[in-house]
Amino acid sequence: MRILITGICGFVGSTLARSLVAAGHQVTGFDNYIRPGSETNREPLQRLGAKVITADLRNATEMSALPACDFVIDAAANASVLAGVDGRTSSRDLVDHNLVGTVNMLEYCKAHQAGFILLSTSRVYSIAPLAALPVVVAQNAFRPDPAAKLPAGLTAAGLDESFATTAPISLYGATKLASEALALEYGEAFGFPVFVNRCGVLAGAGQFGRADQGIFAFWINAWLRRRPLKYLGFDGHGHQVRDCLHPRDLLPVLEKQFAAPKLAAGDRLVNLSGGAASAMSLRQLSDWCEQRFGPHAVTRDGTPRAFDIPWIVLDHAKAQRIWHWHPVTPTSTVLEEIARHAEQHPDWLELSAPA
């Protein structure tokens, strides 16, 4: 299968490229290298046999000149929930990257009758009901209050695909939700297969260390090097919870999607996540770091951060039903992989997240 990966030199794109090459696929990808650290992935991918092109997703002319493929995996995005509102990034640039770029790739798929797989995000789900979610603390982590009435689409197993996606969801979430809708419409209008995979928090060795985009890698690298760390918001206890998934665990479902017959529209959108079994709080991550690296003080700062929520875990039961998929890499393995990479790359924070 000829696979084209957008953002091939990012963490997710490069991880998938390595897995796809190893599985025998012909892999081409492109990147504009604006993400610090992404340049380091180019040569290793080329040595493996992937073809890496320098191109910008926002440039329609460059996209139309790309070689034909059978499937596009869209792994390029500005993936920060704070993008466009943090005073450092432009809202226009965010929309150009995450939405206009998707349109350019959909036009490419239309021209080549290539399939399209969008790697979307848990951040398409509504912030208001999640921010107001009744929670209790157990083992230094929030969990939904079992005695409370929970919003529709949410159980102790996590949010399913029926959970609300109404605003506010952040500008980042809105660009991804709009991309989902456009992708499904393009596929219906022009007769090419489209799948939308809403991913939980993706993590693993080589992830770029920024608190707003790679919290597991950032926290482990910063702890190892005794950098300042803070528990922000929620009274500064670090009880907020996220799930965790290694990108290579996406490969089995991607390969099934490459070969899938036409599915009903509702079956082409699924959550893919580590689920409740993978979920952990920042405080629990700190406990793991302390056991692995020794003690390090974390500052308590109850100042809330925009768009933050106490608990978000995706329920991937639908993906299990449709694709017979489940994650296979335990969180402990993901964390240890990040830790070893951090030890082997002492300059990783400076390389991948310069001030």
Image: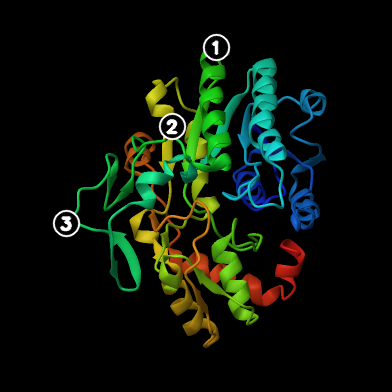
In front of the other: 75 or 102: 102
Q: Which residue is mark 3?
A: 147
| Callout 3: SS | loop
Of badges 3 and 2, nearer the viewer stands 3
Residue at mark 2 to residue at mark 1: CA–CA distance: 17 Å
| Label 2 Cα crowd, 10 Å radius (few <14 / some 14-19 / many 20+) | many
Q: Is residue 288 left or right of residue 182?
A: left
Residue shown at the point (74%, 51%) measured from the top left? 48
The answer to whether the residues at label 3 and label 2 have Cβ atoms under 8 Å apart is no
Residue at mark 3 to residue at mark 2: CA–CA distance: 31 Å
Is 238 placed above or below 14 here? Answer: below
Q: Which residue is mark 2?
A: 269
Q: Earlier in the sequence, mark 3 or mark 1?
A: 3
Estimate the x, y position of residue 238 in percent, counting from the top left. Answer: 44, 70
Is 122 placed above or below 305 here? Answer: above
Q: Which residue is mark 1?
A: 189
Residue shown at the point (35%, 73%) measured from the top left? 140
In front of the other: 235 or 158: 235
Estimate the x, y position of residue 21 in percent, counting from the top left. Answer: 65, 45
Is 57 placed above or below 339 here? Answer: above
| Label 1 Cα crowd, 10 Å radius (few <14 / some 14-19 / many 20+) | few
| Tag 1: amino acid | Ala
Estimate the x, y position of residue 288 in percent, counting from the top left. Answer: 46, 77
| Tag 2: amino acid | Leu
Estimate the x, y position of residue 138 in percent, counting from the top left. Answer: 28, 70
